[in-house]
């Protein structure tokens, strides 16, 4: 018996899950980041991802690729009935040839799509589009492509709708590859100038990731910070300070947040591991005063500075949102858990049950120990709850009960001894306090 530890696309599995849904009369609705922001009263005004949906109700394309050979473009949507991008559509369109990502569609409904950036006062030449095949990854058991940026790549929109300007509060977050970074400036995402020229301090409100410019954090970096123009802040009010509360990042999937507001002018930096098995809590690296007033202009940049700075610039972008209004720290935590639940880097498909309420556990992951023929299911509980975890075969019959007890908060593991079962596909289902929450496929072979 062997379990490969990854989800395979097997015909008939959808029908099995559909049967299980029907038997228990539960909803498979999925909450996305902008759903959470909207509920909290700090709606997304710009939302991008080449990987997944940012709004559960969004039906438009996520991004556009262009074939190098004939310059033909194609919009890439999400998979039917899924929140993950349809990588197979891109693969079919590009084939073995080259292609680039020429547009990131705004999922907020504001029309703030990002195109390849034009020149600025720092780098006068126009930027280039990122390689569409630069990096593929597994997300919740599905293949997707990241925005894999190298020197000279950059995206921008100067004429926008609904963006905070002046001293209006806002929030920015993005998820990046924390192991791929540069020592230049500026791998930014957020609110920037509309004239591609450097403005005064406070003209921008963006989240930054890299090994430095100006402000630094603990260790050797890289760090998350805020590029607010005329400096990159990791804490303090000088833009060139070292803040040891801002940790060096080593996470493969890393989340960075900046929030800016007035009365008095202030900013916050928060960071977290965004992988499915990462820390549940965010780290607040800075929450305090700012040296100047905010006078943002409402342009949007990704992967460059406000004046098209791209000195030794590269990075990897997975998703990001800009909000009107300053999200609360509690909302940040919900967004963080939502990103973890998305399953970045995970070959295991998890299916969310229940309604749009906050889920009490992170999606579990499954690994197989070939020496014992046991599947080990790992999961996290935010609060104490009664957990029921069962294994079902393809006919919907329960063949094993692995957990049926009150479980404390924190990380846990459950073990299913699969020695006696025949080759096939199985479903591990988890309920908390009698409410169905998660399901994952297990493929067993002899």
Image (cartoon, rainbow, N blue to C red):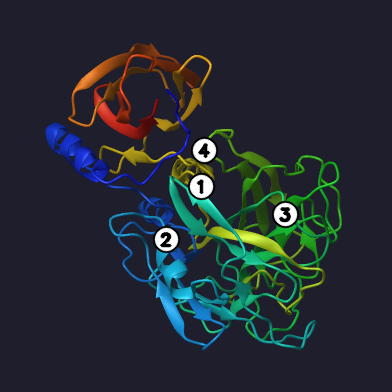
- For the C terminus, the image quarter is top left
Q: Residues within 10 Å of mark 1 (few under 14, many from 20)?
A: some
Q: Secondary structure at mark 2?
A: loop
From the image, state whether disc 1 or disc 3 is nearer to you. Answer: 3
Note whether residue 171 is visible: no
* SS for callout 1: loop
The numbered mark, 4 or 1, whose residue comes first in the sequence reads: 4
- In the displayed structure, 215 sits above or below 253; it is below
Sequence-earlier tag: 3 or 2? 2
Label annotation for residue 37: none
Q: CA distance from mark 4 to mark 2?
A: 18 Å
Task: Give the residue at mark 4.
Answer: 276
Distance from Cα at disc 4 to Cα at disc 1 = 22 Å
**Position of 319 compared to 196: left or right?**
left
Which circle marks residue 328 in the picture? 1
Lateral position of residue 180 relative to residue 339, left or right: right
Q: Mark 1 or mark 3, which has the lower sequence index? A: 3
Residue on which the image places disc 3? 180
Local crowd size for mark 3, using a 10 Å CA cut-off: few (<14), some (14–19), many (≥20):
some
The local crowd at label 2, few if under 14, some if 14 to 19, many if 20 or more residues have their Cα within 10 Å, is many
Front residue of 162/52: it is 52
Counting from the top left corner in percent of width and height, residue 114 is at 53, 76
Q: Which mark is residue 85?
A: 2
């Amino acid at each position: 018996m062997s379990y490969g530890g990854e989800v395979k696309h097997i015909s008939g599995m959808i029908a099995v899950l559909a049967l299980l849904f029907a038997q228990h009369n539960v909803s498979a609705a999925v909450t996305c980041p902008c759903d959470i922001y909207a509920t909290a009263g700090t709606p997304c005004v710009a939302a991008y991802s080449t990987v997944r949906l940012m709004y559960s109700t969004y039906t438009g394309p996520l991004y556009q690729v262009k074939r190098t050979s004939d310059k033909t473009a194609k919009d890439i949507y999400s998979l039917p009935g899924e929140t993950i991008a349809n990588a197979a559509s891109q693969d079919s369109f590009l084939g073995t040839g080259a292609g680039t990502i020429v547009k990131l569609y705004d999922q907020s409904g504001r029309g703030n799509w990002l195109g390849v950036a034009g020149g600025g006062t720092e780098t006068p030449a126009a930027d280039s589009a990122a390689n569409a095949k630069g990096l593929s990854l597994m997300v919740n058991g599905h293949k997707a492509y990241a925005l894999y940026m190298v020197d000279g790549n950059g995206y921008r929109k100067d004429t926008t709708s609904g963006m905070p300007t002046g001293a209006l509060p806002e929030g920015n977050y993005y998820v990046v590859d924390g192991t791929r970074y540069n020592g230049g400036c500026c791998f930014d995402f957020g609110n920037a100038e509309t004239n591609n020229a450097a403005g005064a301090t406070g003209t921008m409100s963006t989240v930054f990731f890299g090994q430095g410019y100006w402000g630094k954090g603990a260790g050797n970096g890289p760090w998350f910070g805020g590029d607010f123009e005329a400096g990159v802040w990791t804490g303090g009010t000088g833009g060139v300070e070292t803040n040891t509360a801002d940790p060096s990042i080593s996470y493969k999937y890393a989340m960075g947040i900046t929030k800016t507001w007035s009365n008095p002018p202030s900013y916050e930096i928060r960071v977290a591991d965004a992988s499915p098995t990462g820390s549940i809590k965010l780290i607040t690296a800075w929450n305090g005063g700012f040296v100047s007033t905010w006078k943002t202009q409402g342009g949007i940049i990704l992967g460059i500075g406000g004046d098209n700075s791209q000195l030794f610039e590269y990075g990897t972008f997975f998703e990001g949102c800009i909000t009107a209004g300053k999200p609360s720290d509690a909302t940040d935590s919900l967004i963080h858990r939502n990103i973890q639940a998305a399953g970045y880097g995970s070959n295991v498909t998890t299916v969310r049950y229940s309604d749009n309420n906050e889920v009490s556990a992170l999606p579990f992951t499954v690994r197989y120990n070939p020496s014992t023929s046991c599947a080990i299911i790992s999961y996290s509980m935010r609060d104490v709850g009664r957990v029921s975890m069962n294994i079902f075969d393809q006919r919907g019959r329960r063949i094993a009960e692995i957990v049926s007890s009150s479980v404390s908060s924190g990380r846990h593991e459950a073990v299913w001894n699969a020695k006696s079962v025949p080759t096939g596909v199985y479903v591990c289902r988890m309920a908390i306090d009698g409410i169905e929450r998660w399901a994952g496929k297990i493929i067993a072979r002899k």
